[in-house]
Amino acid sequence: MIDQKHLIDKITNYADTVNLYSEKATKLFRHALIDTISNTVSVQDDGNIFVATGDIPAMWLRDSTFQVLPYLQLTNKIPEIKALLHGVIKQQLSFIQHDPYANAFNKSANGAHYSQDQSNIPISDWVWERKFEIDSLCAPLYLSFLLYEKTGYKEHLTEEFWQTVDQILDVFITEQHHEESDYYFKRTDCPPSDTLKNGGRGSPVQYTGMVWSGFRPSDDACVYGYFIPGNLFIVSVLQKLLTIIPESFTAVQEKMTTLFTEIKKGIQEFGQMTVAGETVYAYEVDGFGNQLFMDDANVPSLLSLPFLRFCAVDDPLYLSTRHQVLSRNNPFYYAGKYLAGVGSPHTPEDHVWPIALAMEGLTTQNIEKIKAKIDLICATDANTNQCHEGVFVGDPNQYTREWFSWSNMTFCQLVFHYLSFCREEDEGNL
């Protein structure tokens, strides 16, 4: 079990050694890096580690992954971080085993829920919200692989881990045929985006080989059930897990291979479209020919595909998609006096998300563009020393969410990305 106070001290000591090219960037980075480990992380009696999202007490499977992922960059300096990430993964897997259709969980079985929703099974006292989002199941697996790849640590890759992978695969296979699935979700007295139409089952879909998702990573309902960035995330994760799965799990490996092949085929046949003369990835499709092009700041997004290790930053299809995402052809791309970037239907119009600004920097190899995104985020924190959810393009003092740990830590990820280029330049000058 980790000593959290000791780990806070070590991360604080590291943060105090970092001096970026601007005082503001240094201050925001130091605060964000320390804030998450100090104020969102809770070490449980069983060694699992709960990570609250910030101003909401629940733990999202997706958010928690990206909240702790930047700490992976410090494992050489602070080896105890491997145990921290292991504890987070253990908690995530425990939640998935409890209910693989839920997206957010409580710290204890306290019965707290975002609202009183209807679903095909009674919502557990552990579950904060039971929105089925395929990225919620991908994110812990992505963290698990990167922990192994970066450090060689594999104590988390136990028999129970691969059994949980098998459980996730079964859910994905079920939701390849959503019309036959038992899952539904209904919420009353809410915006249409906060529930599923058609009796809680979502808009009809036709089989494509892809996996259906009720909701996006913004927690908003999908318009069409096949969420393309989520399916691309599944492909990326499966491709990586197939390189490390033990030979003893033959049946699981076969399921993974089949699912990987079927989803890739579905994306190729249904997941591309033409926007302004360019071939791009769609955002959502239904298999009947309906397609939606947009992008949302929340990850997985079309913008984030290289960050999710699905493709290279110079992949031609990605570049054409990126070009359209960062244009007015994306209905959630906003530009104003102070900033321009991708927002979300989850927040008011003309609000750009710092997460999306950071992702622009994380998916380029141009150090000047990376610095520009660091500077832009720093200039729009309204002197709060926090990265917010959405920031109004005409006035940075207007923003949503005072405390949003995922946004803070994506900024830290961007700074580490910048520092990696600085190290390469220093080594080249030796």
Image (cartoon, rainbow, N blue to C red):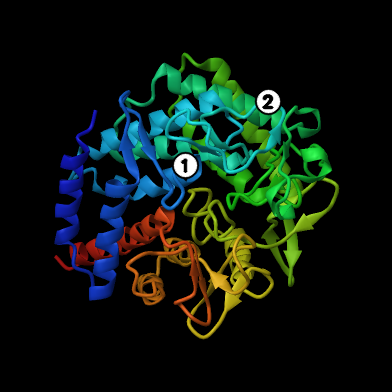
Image: 249 above or below 211 = above
Instruction: Give the image location of residue 271, x and y in percent.
Output: 72, 51
Give the total number of marks visible in the rendering.
Answer: 2
Residue 121's label in the rendered image is 2
Residue 58's label in the rendered image is 1
Q: Residues within 10 Å of mark 2 (few under 14, many from 20)?
A: few
Task: Using the image as rendered, state which of residue 266 and residue 157 is in the foreground.
Answer: 157
Q: What is the spatial separation of the Cα atoms under label 1 and label 2, in whole angstroms?
A: 20 Å
Badge 1 amino acid: Ala
Callout 1–callout 2 Cβ contact below 8 Å = no
Q: Secondary structure at mark 2?
A: loop
Residue in the picture at 63% in, 40% down: 131
Quarter of the figure that contains the C terminus: bottom left
Instruction: Give the image location of residue 304, x and y in percent.
Output: 52, 56
Which tag, 1 or 2, sits closer to the chain's start? 1
Image: 223 above or below 213 = below
Q: Is residue 187 left or right of residue 360?
A: right
Residue in the picture at 61% in, 40% down: 134
Residue 2's label in the rendered image is none
Instruction: Give the image location of residue 379, x and y in percent.
Output: 38, 77
Badge 2 amino acid: Ile
Q: Secondary structure at mark 1?
A: loop
Q: Is residue 27 left or right of residue 121?
A: left
Answer with the quarter of the image where residue 203 lies.
Answer: top right
Answer with the quarter of the image where residue 1 lies.
Answer: top left
Residue in the picture at 49% in, 81% down: 395
Q: Is residue 425 left or right of residue 163?
A: left
Q: Residues within 10 Å of mark 1 (few under 14, many from 20)?
A: many
Task: Using the image as rendered, state which of residue 163 and residue 208 is in the foreground.
Answer: 163
Instruction: Give the image location of residue 202, x and y in percent.
Output: 78, 43
